[in-house]
Amino acid sequence: MIWEVSLGVGAGEIVALVGSNGSGKTTVLRVLSGLREGFLKVTRGTVRFRGHAVAGLDPAQIVGRGLAHVPEGRHLFPGLTVRDNLRLGGYLLASRSQAREALERVLELLPFLRERQRQLAGTLSGGEQQLLAIGRALVQRPSLLMLDEPSVGLAPRMVAVVFELVARIRAGGVSVLLVEQNVRQALALADRGYVLENGRIVLQGAGAELIEHPKVRRAYLGL
């Protein structure tokens, strides 16, 4: 559960939301993207995106407004090809030409996906699947991309690739809300950050400042 969580992401920002397992990070993203099935019930508060209230809209409507969510675990279709997984990201776009253009932009950003277009998604490595999941979300042409633990389970080399991709996505004009257990790298990359504990935000500030905060260094960096 989360209580009195107030956060914002400005245009062109990378904002990190960090905290331990069970702190409520994934719940925050699910509320923002409208994934409220099962036990998750919003009792109060509001979600505003680009000046408009989106609380109560279904997930497809929220995606259509420009907010994309890459969940932990990627949720690809392993029996479909890389290209077909990417094409599914554009199903809400207004026309086939828009979908083709969006797909082409992602293939330019992630050229290895062009080389693997006919390969089944389930045969990719874990890191490659993460990049595919991010690419599929980008085909939606979002203005805000939410990433839930994109580095989890990846080798250090692929973690570096993922974080470098996040920086390039922001450079391309897409804001990013990054949920991460890799606190040091997330805050080093982020313009601003929030620390979540037991469903409440306990610290917030510039990413570089939070790295040096005694509480963060003691609780999350082992210093």
Image (cartoon, rainbow, N blue to C red):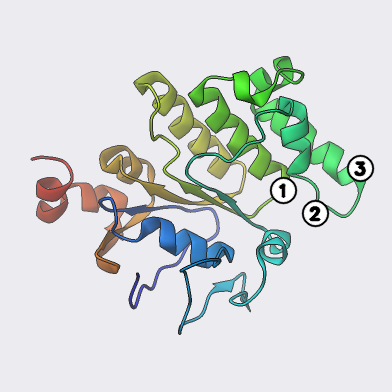
| Kind of residue at badge 2 | Leu
For the point 16% across and 51% down, the residue is 216
Q: Which residue is mark 2?
A: 92
Q: Which residue is mark 1?
A: 140
| Nearest the eye: 65 or 77 | 77
Please state the horizontal and vertical placement of residue 30, each as a whole percent of the image. Answer: 50, 61
Please state the horizontal and vertical placement of residue 220, each as a whole percent of the image. Answer: 18, 46
For the point 70% across and 17% down, the residue is 116
Q: Which residue is mark 3?
A: 97
Q: Earlier in the sequence, mark 2 or mark 1?
A: 2
Badge 2 element: loop
C-alpha span from label 3 to label 2: 12 Å
Residue 85's place in the image compared with 127, above or below, is: below
Residue 64's place in the image compared with 69, above or below, is: below
Residue 24's place in the image compared with 114, above or below, is: below
For the point 47% across and 31% down, the residue is 162
| Kind of residue at badge 3 | Ser
| Kind of residue at badge 1 | Gln
